[in-house]
Image (spheres, coloured by chain):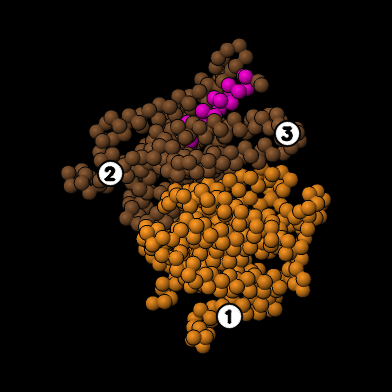
Chain colours: A brown, B orange
Amino acid sequence: MDYTLLLIQILNGIQLGVLLFLVASGLTLIFGILDFVNLAHGSIYMLGAFICASLTYELDSYLFAVILSLPIIAIIGYTFEIFLARPLYARDHLDHVLGTFGAILVIDTIAHLIWGPAGIAIPLPNYLDGQITISENIEVPTFRLLIIVVGLTAAFGLLWLVNFTKLGMLIRAGASNRTMVAALGIDVRTLFAIVFAIGATLAGIAGMLIAPITEASLGMGNNIIITAFVVIIVGGIGSVKGAFVAALLIGLIDTLGRSFLDDLFKVFMSTAAAENSAPAISSMSIYLMMALILSFKPKGLFPPRIR
Amino acid sequence: MLMQFIRSFKFLILVSLLVLPIIFNQIGMSFYLDLATRLCILAIAAVGLNLILGYGGMISFGHAAYLGLGAYAVGIPAHHWLYGGLDFLATNNGFVHITIAVVISGIFAFLTGLICLKTKGVYFIMITMAFSQMAYYLFVSIEEYGSDDGLVINTRSQIPLINLDDPIQMFLVSFSSLIFFMWLVHLITKSNFGLILSGIKDNEARMIALGYNVYLHKLIAFVFSGIICGFAGVLLGNFTTFISPEMIDWSRSGELMFMVILGGVATVMGPLFGAIVFVILEEVLSSITIYWHLPFGLLLIAVVLFFKGGLSSLLSK
């Protein structure tokens, strides 16, 4: 086997995993703390990509566009919470699902009206567009490494925020008993809106990071949201740590499956059969893995202890 | 009892649904016949979903997968019958198509149900969604059947005495299937099995304490619901003569859920009302603007926020 290719594919897998984590962590945070199912989370990811793309052309700088997009996405998340999520907290999950499904249709159509049906590519500045040489014949694009670094930073930042800060303490307290926290004089409604905004920002960051590679496009949110669901189901809904482990696992399985499964199959079946069956199996691999894990641990790898 | 039903509003709707499209077709407006056929097919799928969502409390967000499986059960044998390959599968016999659809959607429902039904609530919603997306990617990855461009079904299912190429016969088959499945689901829900199912919906712990095998009952309902949707898929494939993975996409499952919930869950007529409203909304809104998802989405949000219980609850008041 080609070890250079293997290494590069592992890095690609980690990159996908990190992006999945950014989307899934917001989803799992919102579900774990607010008990709210947000299907429209993928649409916020898409908005992150589109807003960043527009601003990049407006400001002529990708970096400034990202910096300016962050508060915009946070405000969108905050507004979304006030108008759609807040009235639905007391309802059952079915209403959450339907309401946010409606929100997806609205957001996607508005995006279609503003940015048109075609995708928007984002040009990278020169200092991000190069390659970093790791050894003689291994070169990795700088930007892909940056995605991994930013993603890991966000992951640890989030864990630190939830576990070691005053805000995180309030969030955790609000999650286990919101009436008690409110009785202690904390504005739980604003607290929850902040959590929602944090979740939206994380998804927005993922959108901004992927846009220079794939371009911002209309279907992107709906493509990633199901995979993000698989991530939080495998990780255990509500667990940030679980989302992190599962995101990396799924990123690696998906990427490596797509590139190496046919080689693996050729070991024990004919070349033609391997080339026919490998794409089908690899496209299903993460779902098969989910099925396998759930049949042993129906609540995921790291089910949160207190809910 | 029968006379009371005949005088009721529900009966009026059923008769109009049968008669109006044919009249419109005879005066040259065949568009309405197609619309009614599509409506009946979607209503069958909604009836299937209602069995588990409405009566069983299992919120499946993946039922478009069964529509797709049913349609591919027509498309794939027809494809091989016309263009060769896989001789054991190649046929245009309608009964074989239906058998394949029933068996495949039954097996898919059984295998995914084994896993899904171990979970509850939001896990269940997301897992059914994920499995239907798995079916989506499976068909996208098979190049022989057109990947994401889809598969044109060049020959419809052959059934003795019936010619599905005739739009009126296609409509009548869809309409009578709809009536049959509404009746069948009505019988199921009135049976011992159906009562146990709604008992599970109301209080699962009590049903377990009473000694019922809750998991098995849910699994049977889940498989049966999948089979009904698979059958609707056979009709859909014959009606559109085209199938693509896009029909399995989870937004399609969302639309099915919308029909069931808008119509009113756990009622016999609910899925039909929901399908009528959905198809009319889709036609009216998309004739006004190509961006019809915007008003449709706003409406969906408004229904969720302000209007509980669906249309059936309004009518029964």
Where does label 3 land, which residue? A269
Residue at (60% x, 23% y) in the render: A6
| CA distance separating discs 1 and 2 | 54 Å
Q: Secondary structure at mark 1?
A: helix
- In the rendered image of this protein, does residue B70 appear above or below residue A287? below
Q: Secondary structure at mark 2?
A: helix
Query: What residue type is disc 1 on?
Result: Val
- Callouts 1 and 3 on one subunit: no
Where does label 2 land, which residue? A176
Q: State the image coordinates of residue A186 (x, y, percent, origin top left).
A: 20, 43
- Callouts 1 and 2 on one subunit: no
Q: State the image coordinates of residue B297 (x, y, percent, origin top left).
A: 47, 57
**Earlier-in-chain disc, 2 versus 3:** 2
Q: Is residue B45 visible?
A: yes
Q: Nearer the viewer, residue A40 or B291?
A: A40
In-image side of A190 versus B247 (left or right): left
Q: State the image coordinates of residue A83 (x, y, percent, origin top left).
A: 35, 52
Q: Chain of mark 1?
A: B
Q: Which residues are magenta?
A: A3-20
Query: What residue type is disc 3 on?
Result: Met
In-image side of A299 versus B84 (left or right): left
Where does label 1 land, which residue? B15
Q: Secondary structure at mark 3?
A: loop
Q: Quadrant of the C terminus of chain B?
A: bottom left
Q: State the image coordinates of residue A50 (x, y, percent, origin top left).
A: 49, 39
Q: Is residue A45 visible?
A: no
| CA distance separating discs 1 and 3 | 58 Å
Are discs 1 and 2 less than 8 Å apart at CB? no
